[in-house]
Image: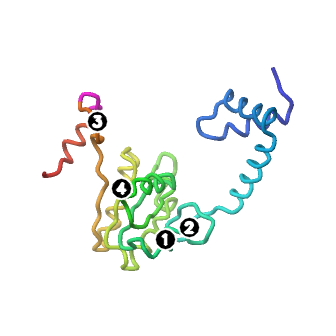
Amino acid sequence: MSFSPLINSLITALRCLPGVGPKSAQRMVFHLLERDKDGGRELARILEETICKVGRCQQCRTLCEEPVCRLCTNPVRDHSTLCVVETPADVMAVEHTGGYRGIYFVLMGHLSPLDGIGPEDLGIDLFRARLATGEIKEVILATNPTVEGEATAHYLAEATKTQNIRVTRIAHGVPFGGELEYIDGGTLARALSARAPV
């Protein structure tokens, strides 16, 4: 069955969101049109305002409304420690741990020659400029444990070595509370090879 052109357009538009297929989009559209038109108007208003006003921090490249984000301007944070992550969602994940008090650099992706993503697409020039200030004493590489994430971490480590800055990599392996019999072989092998003294 075909819906009206506007309903079809809205269903198609909602499918741009990750994890939203045709049925989910259709349910959302009908909910807004049948039960919550005020909510739909508010959603449209906030979405428009957010897309127009949110950009990237000039220092760390995370998403924010100001030229420089609140994390970068916070005087309480440790500005000598720089955690490099792939996405703004990774910043939020690290922040939710409550255990990191440094600053960030967001790559907005990872090296992927097959997809045409090189160092210039990840803001590596800005990363090098941050290191050249002399303020950074440690770079924590927190890219994802994928082939692309590992290649990116290796590239960044090499770029950092010339600056006499300590470079560390977040640990990967057996999760806290995990049971060995349920851990996949690759994860367990990595945990064994990266074991630490007790």
Disc 2 is placed on an element classified as: loop
N-term-proximal mark, 3 vs 4: 4
Front of the two marks 1 and 4: 1
**Residue at mark 4:** 153
Indicate the quadrant where residue 39 lies.
Answer: top right
Q: Earlier in the sequence, mark 2 or mark 1?
A: 2
Coloring scheme used: rainbow
Q: Amino acid at mark 1?
A: Cys
Which mark, by number, is residue 72?
1
Between the C-alphas of marks 3 and 4, the distance is 26 Å
62 sits to left or right of 25: left
Q: CA distance from mark 1 to mark 4?
A: 22 Å
Q: Position of residue 165 (x, y in %)?
A: 29, 71
- Residue shown at 48%/54% (left/top)? 92
Q: CA distance from mark 1 to mark 3?
A: 35 Å
Q: Are marks 2 and 1 in contact (CB under 8 Å)?
A: yes
Work out how far the residue at label 2 is from the one at label 1, CA to CA, in angstroms.
8 Å
From the image, tell me which residue sits under label 2. 57
**Residue bearing mark 3:** 178
Q: Which circle's residue, 1 or 3, is located before the other in the chain? A: 1
Mark positioned earlier in the residue sequence (1 or 4) = 1
Q: Residue at x 36, y 73 (%)?
A: 80
Residue at image point 30% right, 46% down: 172
Q: Amino acid at mark 3?
A: Gly
Q: Position of residue 102 (x, y in %)?
A: 39, 67
Residue drawn at (70%, 39%), measured in percent from left and top? 14
Q: Is residue 128 above or below residue 52?
A: below
Segment tinted magenta in the rendering: 181-185
Seen as rendered, the residue at the extreme top is 1
**Mark 1 residue element:** helix
| Label 2, label 4: how far apart the Cα atoms are | 22 Å
Asked whether residue 43 is drawn in magenta, I would say no
